[in-house]
Image (cartoon, rainbow, N blue to C red):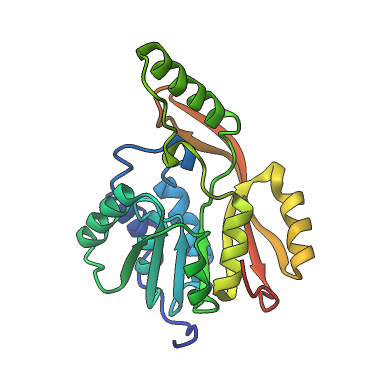
Amino acid sequence: MMACGRKQSKISRKHLEIELYKIRNFAKPVIGWEQYMTPPGLAAEILVQIEHDIDGCIVADLGCGTGMLSIGCALVGADFVLGLEIDSEATLVAADNVANSNLQGKVDLVTCDIKSAGMGALCKRFDTVFMNPPFGTKTGVKDIRIRRHRQKHKQKGTAAVVYSSDVCQATDIDFLKVSCMIARKCVYSLHKSETIRYIETICKEWGVKAETVGNIPQYNLTASYKHESKQSKNIDVSLLRLSDLGQIKEI
């Protein structure tokens, strides 16, 4: 695969944001996977700031959802983007979004669990990873949902089955570990600001350089689930850039 090459910017921030607003959201978001679509305005703002690590590069988007960051990377000049998503329904929506953006052949999508053994085949195959992994804002919800599910079946006299969609398959640390394994140059990742110190400690243990390159106070999460009483909520988020990735060899 070719290395990154700086090219002239292909799209303005305003035009990029307009294009990203066209992207369809999750039809049925799964709470255990913390499926929230990255706001188009925020995605556009970040992408124009990190364009130098995207333009002319081979990029991966872990947990790509319906394709917001994958499509955004392609629009700012990535040579190729691979989006990986565990939810097959979200992948189908993402495929439609890619087609509507006329990016077939430039953005490919794969339905998979990032913790699967097959990820080893992607080791150091990408220049850059850009992702918005689970924040961990749903701590405890999994157990509540399982209890309700079992109680419902107990009342009906039927057996309770806890489906995999009720359980968060990977944590933000899992996403970081895999991203460091598959990226050659750098990783950009969004995280709750209150977790940054812990993540920096983990990265130091891995021998990876972690630096905060942006802070997003009052990051807005629009309500996506029936149990959420508020239309939206705000949390403080930071953008991390990881580099010196050579020591990460496996999950």
- Which is nearer the eye, 149 or 183? 149
Against 105, residue 193 (above or below) is: above
Q: Is residue 158 visible?
A: yes
Lateral position of residue 158 relative to residue 45, left or right: left
Instruction: Please report the residue visible at 39 percent of the width from the left and 19 percent of the height from the top.
Output: 153
Residue 83 position within the rendered picture, expressed as x and y whole percent measured from the top left:
39, 63
Against 2, residue 200 (above or below) is: above
Instruction: Please report the residue visible at 51 percent of the width from the left and 63 percent of the height from the top.
Output: 130
Q: Quadrant of residue 36?
A: top left
Q: Report the number of discs.
A: 0
- Which is nearer the eye, 180 or 74? 180
Residue 102 position within the rendered picture, expressed as x and y whole percent measured from the top left:
21, 66
**Residue at the extreme top:** 155
Instruction: Please report the residue visible at 43 percent of the width from the left and 23 percent of the height from the top.
Output: 149
For the N terminus, which image quadrant? bottom left
Residue 98 position within the rendered picture, expressed as x and y whole percent measured from the top left:
26, 61
Q: Quadrant of residue 206?
A: bottom right
Residue 157 position within the rendered picture, expressed as x and y whole percent measured from the top left:
37, 15
**Residue at the extreme bottom:** 2
Lateral position of residue 53 relative to residue 236, left or right: left
Against 205, residue 23 (above or below) is: above
For the C terminus, which image quadrant? bottom right
Q: Is residue 229 visible?
A: no
